[in-house]
Amino acid sequence: MKIMSGWSLIRIATILVYLFLFAPVAVVILLAFNANQFGGFPIEGFSLRWFDALWNNDAIVRAFKTSLLLGLLTSAVSTTLGTLAALAMVRYDFPGKRTISTLLVAPILIPEVVLAVALLLFLQFLSMPKSFGLLLMGHVVFTLPFVVLVVQARLVSIRRDVEEAAMSLGATPIQTFFEITLPLMLPAVMAGMLFSFTISFDDITGTLFWKPGGVETVPTQIFAMLRNSISPEINALGAVMVIFTIALPLVAASVSRVLSMRKIRASNRTNNRANNSSEQTA
């Protein structure tokens, strides 16, 4: 009897772990198309009725618009602040640099529920009521470290002499940033933006503490619907969120790949023209 090798056991264990993790997601998507009004097994037939009911549910549509707006604002603010902070951490030396770097990354190390309660108590101490601005600020605090870490990792690999060469040819620091540094670190910036948007869109723990009354995001709307009963609309909404969060990184990766290919082709054309000019001159 042939004994399986260690790598075969590792592959089987890996497959089982992935099945255990993703099987519930597959079940939710499968039940979203179930014609059964109770949203469970057995499956009685294929139907899109729950997606239609989802589209006509004003509360869910309103929650989706709120989550979309909140995610876009969070990604914009976190990406801007995180990119500037990463530039300062990598390119400059100043007093308290290590302390500030630790504080920027600290929200990742602190449990989200502790961070949510701490920020809520702090703002209550300042007599600030709950608002959409508070919710946005909380999401920025939580997503900012991800942008800083991703952009920092990219900036470390960008050679400083490339920027110095541009400035030695007459470019100002601002021109150097937009013409040299930003294009080189653009994939990391886009990745950080995607991270912050996805985390903000899916967040529920901090949102439950920070959101004002009457404002619901998609995760909190699902949580509120689950208090009453497990409606088939929840399965449809879960399927939409899963597809949305999977499709977004794929689209971003495709766009990044297309932009990279265009830059490579443009660089190759420039090099070919320079070579042809030098050959003609010779």
Image: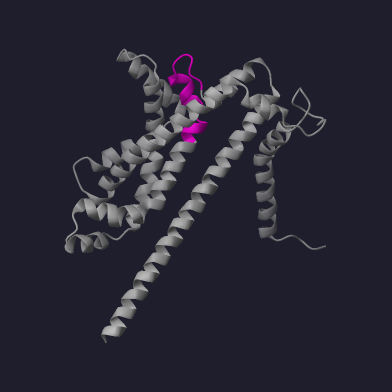
| Depth order, front residue of 58/88 | 58
The type of colouring in the image is: one colour
Relative height, residue 169 to residue 73 (above, below): below
The quarter of the picture where the N terminus appears is bottom right
Which residue is nearer to you in this view: 144 or 250? 250
Q: Look at the image and say whether residue 204 sits in the magenta stretch.
A: yes
Q: Which quarter of the picture shows residue 128?
A: top left
Q: Is residue 176 above or below residue 192?
A: below
From where the camera sits, is residue 109 visible?
Answer: no
Where is residue 135? Give x, y as percent: 41, 24
The segment highlighted magenta reads 199-216
Location of the C terminus (image quadrant): bottom left
Q: Which residue is drawn at 55% across and 39% down?
A: 245
Q: Position of residue 165 (x, y in %)?
A: 22, 64
From the viewer's perspective, tell me whether residue 113 is left or right of residue 34: left
Residue 184 locus on image (x, y percent): 35, 56
Which residue is located at x 72 percent, y 28 percent? 49
Q: In which quarter of the image is residue 261?
A: bottom left
Q: Where is residue 6 in the image (x, y as percent from the top left)?
A: 67, 59
Residue 11 on the magenta span = no
194 or 65, nearer to the observer: 65
Left or right: where does residue 255 sit relative to residue 279?
right
Q: Does residue 60 lie above or below 149 as drawn?
A: above
Q: In the displayed structure, does residue 52 sit left or right of residue 117?
A: right
Q: Residue at (29%, 57%) from the top-left corner? A: 180
- Residue 152 visible (yes or no): yes
- Tell how many labels: 0
